[in-house]
Image (spheres, helix red, strand yellow):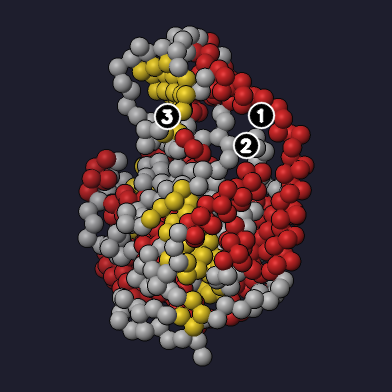
Amino acid sequence: MTRLTVVRSGMPAPDPAPGETVLTYDQFRAELRTGGLMKRLFRAGESRLLVHRVSSAGRPVATALALHAVSRGSVAIEDADGRRREISLGVLGRWIAELALEPLRVRNVVAGITREVARLEAIVGEPRTITDIDLSASPLYLRTDLSFGIRAGGSVGHTAGVLNNLEHFTGPPVLITTDDIPTLDPRIEVVTVAPSDAYWNFRELPAFVLNAPFERVVRRVADERRVSFLYQRYSLSNYTGVAVSRALGVPLVLEFNGSEVWVSRHWGRPLKYDALSTRIETLNLHAADLIVVVSDPIAADLRRMGVAADRVLVNPNGVDPVLYRPDINGDRVRRAYGLDGYFVIGFIGTFGPWHGAEVLARAYVQLRQRHPELRDAVRLLMIGDGARTAATRAILVSGGALDATAFTGLVPQDDGSEHLAAADLLVSPHVTNPDGTPFFGSPTKLFEYMAMGRPIVASDLEQIGQTLEHGRTAWLVPPGDVEALADAMARLASDAAARRALGAAARQQAVARHTWREHTRRIVDRIADLYSVRLRDRLAGDVIAPRR
């Protein structure tokens, strides 16, 4: 029996079995647009859509209709763990009916969310007192993002970094999440929340409607154990932590990596429900007992909003110095991309607008033009994938440098350090915010670069410039300055002694100041400053002092 397999974006494509045709989602959509799918009508014995998780696949009506058109037999959604949901014509008909009714319900959904936000605003406006907490109880970590199948990047590193180290200072943490987290310690209990498959045709509504099912699961988990505090990584339009922390009478620690509303306005698409999402964001910031931010500019924004300084902890991102270390061998990666014998300049990232990948591409083109002695000796290794990958490639093509560049595509978090080890020099070319506001990021790649013990060229930009010292732990250049970046890369490519010195000093500083263990310790120490706590610090053997 022949089979057609369509692989949703973000999923690795499997090797075809005998009689199987495998198409990426982009290839499948291209066939739909061009009419190429007509050649496949009723040719397949069965068809399937491969997704990261069946429970978060939504209702892919158009894809299911197309798969039914090409299949004589069953149509199903399957995921990476072997779960399967058959999409019969009856299921498809019910989906279509539900989609037809949803536009009529949107106004009531938004009105209900607005009423709940108003209720929580009133509760948050009332004073409450938490006299002490028992940190030997379990903290609940809430990951409420509606992004799925993320295998690498700063959010993955941060989430796993905190969770993997909480147990050294608290009772056993529990992760309540919409998706699994790579590199998470397998001993950590994970509870998965399946989002509703309703309203996925309305870009912002799924985030609103997630609150109710997520809150139900958090309350159920809390009923089964003693809870010390809630820790929520804030995501757009989510107020679960506010609701549950008030109901349970436990502190809410909010990890706030910058305004999601601002990101939508400047790096994404403007929000239809901008005002409501802003209210929810403001509600979280005023309700949280402690707000953990990664940089001083975010803390300054919160102070301007009236958030008390003693409720804000500036806590830059970190690194696991065991996973990222100088002795990791990158030879396999070098061989895979034809980099043996070359001096390799490396970059890793999700190619976001703030990462400066295009600046690096222009600088690499200039390096080859202005330093002909290095043209045949230097190669560029671009690790990762994302929104600005195509623009980055276009720059390299126009500059005649694409054939001297290796693009790896997205690599799993577990493989990131091996890819960084393939580079002789690592670059962090971050750029300023488009609206002139201070750069508020704390790039995880920066700390991973440092822990690898490789020399670094980086933008002298806010926290990046505060963390690195020019000429001692890195070579700093003005952000967006293509010529300065090209000259800095050329300079270090020609100076092995400087590379060794910079790399060694950066590694030493990363281990001393920027591990996830120390990052997590600072969070628990600040909780101890705010409350009387009861817990022996199992890591160092010291007792956390109660608040005075």
Q: Position of residue 524 (x, y in %)?
A: 44, 75
Q: Position of residue 161 (x, y in %)?
A: 39, 62
Quarter of the image holding residue 311?
bottom right
Give the residue at mark 3. Answer: 84
Q: Is 352 located above or below residue 514 in the figure?
A: above
Q: CA distance from mark 3 to mark 2?
A: 19 Å
Is disc 1 placed on a helix, strand or loop?
Answer: helix
Residue drawn 37% across the image and 37% down it: 81
Task: Say if mark 2 contacts mark 1, CB within 8 Å.
Answer: yes
Q: Is 535 located above or below residue 240 in the figure?
A: below
Q: Is residue 300 left or right of residue 360?
A: right
Residue drawn 54% across the image and 57% down it: 219
In the rendered structure, which disc, 3 or 2, sits on the residue that comes first in sequence? 3
Residue 367 visible within the image: no
Quarter of the image holding residue 58?
top right
In the rendered structure, which disc, 1 or 3, sits on the residue that comes first in sequence? 3
Q: Is residue 377 left or right of residue 178?
A: left
Give the residue at mark 1. Answer: 98
Give the residue at mark 2. Answer: 198
Task: Assign the N terminus to one quadrant of the image.
Answer: top left
Task: Identify residue type, mark 3.
Answer: Arg
Q: Nearer the viewer, residue 80 or 325?
A: 80
Task: Identify residue type, mark 1.
Answer: Glu
Residue 127 visible within the image: yes
Task: Say if mark 3 contacts mark 2, CB within 8 Å.
Answer: no
Please tell me how crowded label 1 is: few (under 14), some (14-19), or many (20+) other residues with Cα within 10 Å: some
In the rendered structure, which disc, 2 or 1, sits on the residue that comes first in sequence? 1
